[in-house]
Amino acid sequence: MSNWLPLIATLFIQAMVAMALLTLPVMAPVAAKALEVSPALVGVYVSITYAGAMFASLTSGTTVGRLGPIRVSQYGLLLCATGLCLCAIPWLPAVGLGALFIGLGYGPITPASSQILARTTPPSQMGLVFSIKQTGVPVGAMLAGAIVPSLMLGIDWQWSLVVVAAACIVSALMSQPLRADMDDLRQTHLKFQMESLTSPLRMVLGHRALSTMAACSFMFSMVQMSLTTYLVTYLHDDLAYGMVSAGLLLSITQMGGIGGRIVWGVVADRWMGAQKTLALLAILMALSALATALLLPLLPIWGIWIILMMFGASAIGWNGVYLSEVARQAPEGKASVATGGTLAFTFLGVVIGPPIFGAISTGFGTYRAGFLALVITSSLCAWVLFRLQPHNAKPQPE
């Protein structure tokens, strides 16, 4: 098998589940009106999805080991498709159940891809390869921001959800030929036990480097998901942008994330190491969040582009550096378990972050207040990272 095929396959799958997860937040102002709720409640949707993702990530060590990473990815895509169809029903309980299904589908995708890439990637290239794979998240979000608002102009928001669901189903079918090569190390004797939920957490909490990455990802994920969840609504409600224009600016932010994930992977591999790179990103997040909170409608469009691209490059660009370091530090053959354990903290930040952002914005009557709160979160993370001693990476065997 080509060394590039695992990367291409995992990148494509990651992009599709990311698009599935972010389709409803992109259409939040329109969908919220149909459901007769506040657009700020999109934070609750994100919390439900990531609560499901957190559970799925904790069980991913067993499920990936038993079923294989491609089968797990296919099931994840199908769960996302089911969730999107449920979200198309204009009834809050159906949307809540749909959010849970999307989360259960999204959760095991990263542990599954980490298992594949940890096995096929040389240690000296892990930062770059994992960062390229993680561009799938902003690619999926960019597709959601660029396609979904335009799609809603031709068909309504409900059918737009169904179209994205159909794309997830097609992606699952396209992955079928990869099973033979990538699921060849399945351990079919593995069974799910309650220990499957706790052993990843024990591994992370008992390992200083992994626990540091978990704490870092908890704070970073609060910033990232608050940005991607509320940017369109902020631009639409506070700055009077149209839905298509706001969606395109979200895509600009995601483009910054795509470039950032690749650049930061190279920086971490060749010069700064993971910890210093993440500390630098925390500082850039704080500055970008402050600039976003102070945006004015009269600001030239190129200035808004620069601010949002920098915000995306930092707040969406950290994941590959973090995941490659987790895979490096994981015990041999346990990359999916360690990834699942640290992702539980990542998803916890996502569950907590957007509702807090929404509550702060509602309380102050403007989404600017939410972005100012992100300045504090990012600054705290930078302070923690600068105070910690760097960890020596333990390379995975090739």
Image (spheres, rainbow, N blue to C red):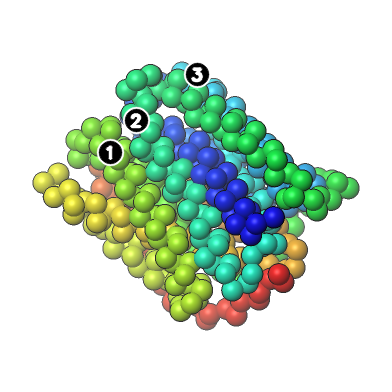
Mark number, residue 89: 3
Label 1 residue SS = helix
> Camera-side residue: 48 or 136?
136
Q: Looking at the image, do the residues carrying marks 2 and 1 touch, with CB atoms under 8 Å apart? A: yes
Mark 3 or mark 1, whichever is nearer to me: 1
Mark 3 or mark 2, whichever is nearer to me: 2
Cα gap from disc 3 to disc 2, whole angstroms: 18 Å
For the question of whether residue 164 can be seen, the reply is yes
Q: Which amino acid does label 1 sit on?
A: Ala
Q: Is residue 391 above or below residue 232?
A: below
Residue 266 on image: x %, y %? 47, 70
> Camera-side residue: 24 or 293?
24
Q: Residues within 10 Å of mark 3 (few under 14, many from 20)?
A: some
Cα gap from disc 3 to disc 1, whole angstroms: 25 Å
Image point 28% across, 32% down: which residue?
243
Image point 41% across, 37% down: which residue?
144
Mark number, residue 149: 2
Q: Looking at the image, do the residues carrying marks 3 and 2 touch, with CB atoms under 8 Å apart? A: no
Q: In this view, does 143 lie above or below 264?
A: above
Question: How many numbered marks are there?
Answer: 3
